[in-house]
Image: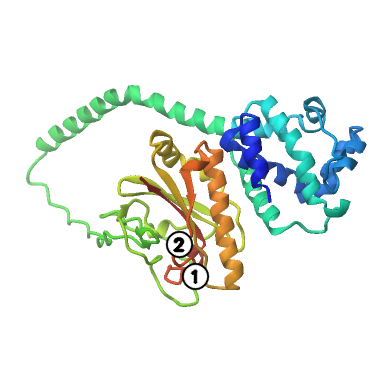
């Protein structure tokens, strides 16, 4: 529906791979219910004296009038407006963003108003793109994430001195123990906690994140409700083994778990039931994977969506696809080139072997070289 527009915007206005998330954020902003949906969006232009231009967009066609960058600044350029959010979150030039919007708006409004009327509901493809855009609008700005990462690097210059101080303290502690009386009664050794298994749940690309050996489970950890089949574990195809997050770290709802597979960063992105919104912690949890992909341009992020076994199978399959697309959009917004991402449907998207329904509602991102 929008493939040609996305390619043209990326090539003509210097936004490249940011064209898809730009369109997604535009659709989310245009159709947001809290601001009156598409009708409320168009009313902003009418209030700015651009009613005839808006009228020419309805239904599409060659009669659609252009809108200038200055006119877009008047309607969408306020602090916190769409233009400000696009430049902050996607890192694109403001003038390029305005030009891209000016090109997209007549075509998008035309597609959303068949016959010149505003529909009561959005087509599924538009709703999916808008949902992904909502997640992007809610995510922190890319610049702030980068600044946080840069700030953390400043600690490295103090690391050697910290190591020296720690070593000195350990030496003093050892000496003090050596001079202690030898006839002191020995204390009874504490009972050792049982050692967890060293193998993690099996993922769709191979065994999943391994449990850290020697680490006891946190008391009071919430357990997810079992799925209909009562099976435990994770999805079943065999492959390369990974190390990292424990199975107990799987969130009960939306969330992100970062781990390692074959010494490369990987992600599991979990979703609320029936939702495709990416968790707000995605930017922070995905930073290692994003940096890896930027440094290894020959590698691809393979993105696969899974769903639980409850409900309508066809709708679940569509939900898995849209969740994978939402994660792809989030990676692109974080700076990963779109051609370095690959949507790949797993052999069995309906996961009946996971420990819970919430564990099945996920998208896995693995690196393929």
Q: Position of residue 93 (x, y in %)?
A: 64, 26
Q: Position of residue 237 (x, y in %)?
A: 36, 65
Q: Which part of the image, by quadrant, shows the C terminus?
A: top left
Judging by the rendered image, the residue that carries numbered circle 2 is 346
Residue 15 placement, left or right of 258:
right
Residue 264 placement, left or right of 53:
left
Q: Residue at x 52, y 65 (%)?
A: 307
- Choose between 119 and 137: the one closer to the eye: 119
Mark 2 residue element: loop
Residue 1 visible in image = yes
Q: Residue at x 52, y 36 (%)?
A: 335
- Choose between 131 and 62: the one closer to the eye: 62
Q: Residue furthest left?
A: 182
Q: Residues within 10 Å of mark 1 (few under 14, many from 20)?
A: few
Q: Is residue 310 above or below residue 184?
A: below
Single out the mark in the foreground, 1 or 2.
2
Residue 112 placement, left or right of 22:
right
What's the distance in space between the residues labelled 1 and 2, CA to CA? 24 Å
Q: Residue furthest bottom?
A: 229
Judging by the rendered image, the residue that carries numbered circle 1 is 225
Q: Is residue 61 above or below residue 349?
A: above
Q: Position of residue 75 (x, y in %)?
A: 81, 32
Query: Coloring scheme of the render?
Result: rainbow
Q: Residues within 10 Å of mark 2 (few under 14, many from 20)?
A: some
Q: Position of residue 223 (x, y in %)?
A: 45, 65
Q: Residue at x 59, y 56 (%)?
A: 322
Q: Residue at x 77, y 33 (%)?
A: 76
Residue 67 placement, left or right of 362:
right
Residue 273 visible in image = no
Asked if the residue under mark 2 is in contact with the one under mark 1, i.e. CB atoms within 8 Å, the reply is no
Identify the image quadrant of residue 14.
top right
């Amino acid at each position: 529906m929008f493939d040609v527009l996305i390619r043209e915007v990326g090539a003509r206005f210097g936004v490249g791979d940011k064209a898809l998330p730009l369109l997604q954020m535009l659709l989310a902003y245009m159709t947001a219910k809290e601001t009156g949906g598409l009708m409320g969006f168009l009313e902003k232009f009418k209030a700015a004296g651009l009613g005839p231009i808006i009228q020419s967009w309805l239904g599409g066609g060659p009669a659609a009038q252009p809108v200038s960058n200055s006119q877009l600044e008047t309607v969408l350029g306020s602090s916190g407006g769409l233009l400000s959010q696009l430049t902050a979150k996607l890192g694109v030039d403001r003038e390029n963003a305005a030009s891209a919007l000016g090109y997209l708006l007549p075509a998008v409004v035309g597609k959303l108003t068949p016959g010149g009327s505003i529909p009561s509901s959005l087509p599924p493809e538009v709703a999916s793109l808008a949902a992904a855009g909502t997640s992007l609008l809610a995510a922190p700005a890319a610049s702030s994430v980068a600044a946080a990462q840069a700030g953390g690097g400043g600690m490295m210059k103090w690391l050697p001195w910290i190591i020296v101080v720690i070593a000195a303290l350990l030496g003093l502690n050892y000496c003090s123990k050596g001079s202690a009386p030898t006839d002191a009664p020995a204390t009874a050794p504490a009972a050792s906690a049982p050692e967890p298994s060293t193998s993690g749940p099996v993922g769709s690309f191979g065994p999943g994140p391994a449990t850290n050996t020697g680490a006891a489970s946190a008391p009071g950890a919430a357990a997810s409700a079992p799925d209909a089949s009562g099976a435990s574990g994770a999805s079943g195809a065999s492959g390369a083994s990974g190390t990292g997050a424990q199975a107990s770290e799987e969130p009960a709802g939306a969330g992100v778990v970062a781990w390692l597979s074959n010494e490369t960063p990987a992600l599991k992105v979990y979703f609320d039931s029936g939702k495709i919104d990416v968790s707000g912690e995605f930017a922070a949890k995905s930073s290692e994977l994003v940096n890896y992909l930027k440094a290894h341009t020959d590698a691809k992020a393979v993105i696969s969506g899974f769903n639980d076994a409850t409900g309508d199978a066809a709708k679940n399959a569509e939900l898995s696809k849209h969740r994978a697309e939402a994660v792809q959009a989030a990676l692109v917004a974080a700076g990963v080139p779109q051609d370095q991402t690959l949507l790949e449907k797993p052999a069995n998207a309906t996961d009946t072997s996971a420990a819970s329904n919430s564990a099945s509602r996920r998208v896995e991102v693995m690196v393929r070289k």
